[in-house]
């Protein structure tokens, strides 16, 4: 199976969101990154976009781009985690090239948070 796939078992379902301790790892102007543990050893990914983030067409496009980013960059994410990107508000331009930098900055924030958690105080 291709490493650039986004299989059904890698998607976050409603069942995956219940009863979890979600930790906010980063925030940009348009997105918020949340993470929780899972016991399946997989990296699971989901995107949530409420009605405030645009029309159905705009929300679906943002979600499609976020899933595509995950599919192409999932090797950057740790195994055994549930990752959610929550759309705070609609970006002015909804293009992969513009949103890619924002998603990468969220991952950098996550990495910095992870390093802080493991460093001795």
Image: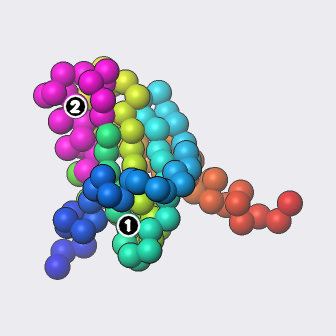
Q: In which quadrant is the N terminus drawn? A: bottom left
Residue 17 visible: yes
Q: Is residue 26 above or below residue 53?
A: below
For label 1, the residue is: 43
Depth check: give the residue in front, 64 or 97.
64
Report which residue position mark 2 lands on: 59
Q: For the stretch drawn in magenta, what is the main secondary structure? A: helix
Q: Is residue 50 left or right of residue 32?
A: left
Q: Is tag 2's residue or tag 1's residue first in the polypeptide sequence?
A: 1
Report crowding for label 2: few under 14, some 14 to 19, many 20 or more residues within 10 A (C-alpha). Answer: many
Query: Which residue lies most toward the left here?
Result: 57
Instruction: Look at the picture and state if 9 lies above or below 36.
Output: below
Q: Assess disc 1: are there few (<14), some (14-19) or many (≥20) residues with their C-alpha within 10 Å of its C-alpha.
A: many
User: In the rendered image, which quarter is residue 77 located in?
Assistant: bottom left
Instruction: Please give the name of the residue rendered at 32% of the width and 58% of the height, measured from the top-left corner.
Output: 15
Q: What span is in magenta?
A: 49-67
Q: How is the image coloured?
A: rainbow
């Amino acid at each position: 199976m291709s490493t650039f796939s986004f299989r059904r078992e890698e998607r976050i379902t409603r069942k995956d969101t219940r009863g979890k301790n979600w930790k906010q790892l980063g925030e940009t102007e348009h997105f918020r990154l949340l993470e929780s543990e899972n016991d399946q050893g997989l990296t699971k990914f989901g995107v949530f976009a409420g009605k405030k983030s645009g029309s159905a067409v705009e929300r679906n496009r943002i979600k499609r781009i976020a899933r595509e980013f995950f599919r192409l960059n999932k090797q950057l994410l740790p195994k055994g985690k549930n990752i959610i990107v929550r759309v705070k508000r609609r970006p002015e331009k909804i293009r992969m090239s513009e949103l890619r930098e924002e998603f990468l900055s969220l991952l950098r924030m996550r990495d910095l948070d992870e390093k802080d958690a493991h460093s001795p105080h």
